[in-house]
Amino acid sequence: MNCGFHVKSTLYNRKWFDLHHGLKTSYWDFRTYLQNHNLELLEFIEEHTDLASNQKTIWANFEENLSRLNMKKVLSSYSDYLPSLEDDYDKRDFDSFPQIIKDRVSEILEGLEESFRQFIKSIQYSDKAHINAIKLDSKARFLQFNYTPTLENLYNVKHNQIEYIHNSVLLDDILVLGHGENPKTIIKDTWSPPSHLYGKDLDIWKMEDGMSDDYTYREGESNFHSYYIKTRKESQQIIGNKRLFFDALSGIDDIHVFGHSLSQVDLPYFKEIIKSISSNVTWTVSYYDKKDIVNFERTLNNLGVNSKQLTFIPLSELQLSKNQLFLF
C-alpha cells in the first residue's frame, strides 16, 4: 500500500497552509480579534509579558511566549490586596491576595480559550481561497496541526482521514493552545508553613511569626503557578490520547511535511511518528527559504531519519493550476 501521510503546519508562525489560502489565521490576526472583542485580555497579555516592549515579537511566537507571562509583574499589579502589618487585620486579609490571583488566573485561562475558539470560528473562506490550492492526495491520511477545517472545505478530504492533533473547531473538545516549557523550569520551590499546622494554629503561627505578608504573597505565587501548568502543551498525554492513530501508521511509506517549521514544541509528535513507521519511509519536506533546509535536515537526522530518505521542495512547486484544482 502506497499511502501518503501529510503533516500540516501549526498555528503560530508555521501556519503556512491556512495563510497560503488567504485565511486570516496568524497570531497577529488573533491580536486584532482580541482588540475588537477582548481588549482587557489583550492589554493584560502585552503589559505583563517579558517582551512587552515589542508587540510583534510577542505575537510572532505567541504560543511559546505564553510561558513568558511575568509572574512578578502580575502579582505586583494586585499588591494592594496584600495585608499590611501596620494595620489591624483578620484571617480574611490572609486570603484576599491569594484568592484574587487564583481568580485572575482562571479569568486569563478561560478568556484565552474562549477568545481563541471564537477567533477560529470567525475565519472566513473567500472565493479566491481555491486559487492557491496545492497538490494534495485527497485520499491520503493527514495529521493536522491547524484548528481550521481547510482540508474539508477546500479539498473535500473526509473528516475520518484527518487527525487534529490539537483538536478542531469542528469538535467539542477544548482547543490545545500552549507552550512547550516544562513548568518546573519556570516555577521555583514554593515556601510553605509547617505541614502539621492547620486552622487556628496556622493563623496564630502566621501572626506570631510576623509572616502574614510573606505568606499571602507566596500563596499568591503558588496559585499563579497553575497558569504555567495549564498553558503547557502536554504532548505525551496528547500522544496517549491519540494512541490509535499512531499505532495505525505502520503501513505508511510516504510522508509529506507541508509548511511545518519542526520547532521544539512539536518534535515529540514527530518522534512518535518515526517510532510508528518503518525505517525506509521517504520524506518530502517543503521549505520557504533555502536557509531552512540545513536546520530541517539536522532536526530530522537527530530524530533518526537518514538524509537519503529526505527530499526538500520549495513551497512554490506545490501550487496547482486552476484546471488541476477541479480534480479534487
Image (tube, grey):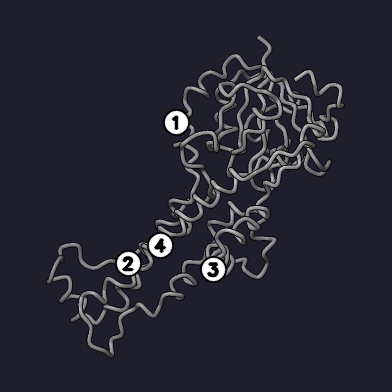
- Of the two numbered discs 1 and 4 on the same chain, state the one appearing first in sequence: 4
Residue that mark 2 sits on: 99
Q: Is residue 262 left or right of residue 182?
A: right
Circle 1: residue type: Asn
Q: Secondary structure at mark 4?
A: helix
Q: Residues within 10 Å of mark 1 (few under 14, many from 20)?
A: few
Circle 2: residue type: Gln
Cα–Cα gap, marks 3 and 2: 19 Å
Select label 2 or label 4 by which is in front.
2
Q: Secondary structure at mark 2?
A: helix
**Looking at the image, is 326 positioned above or below residue 234?**
above
Q: Which mark is residue 48?
A: 3
**Residue nearest the observer in this picture, 109 or 327:** 327
Q: Position of residue 112 (x, y in %)?
A: 51, 54
**Residue nearest the observer in this picture, 266 or 27:** 27
- Of the two numbered discs 3 and 2 on the same chain, state the one appearing first in sequence: 3
**Looking at the image, is 85 positioned above or below residue 35?**
below
- Of the two numbered discs 1 and 2 on the same chain, state the one appearing first in sequence: 2
Q: Secondary structure at mark 1?
A: helix
Cα–Cα gap, marks 3 and 4: 13 Å
- Of the two numbered discs 2 and 4 on the same chain, state the one appearing first in sequence: 2
Cα–Cα gap, marks 1 and 4: 27 Å
Residue 199 position by quadrant: bottom left
Residue that mark 4 sits on: 224
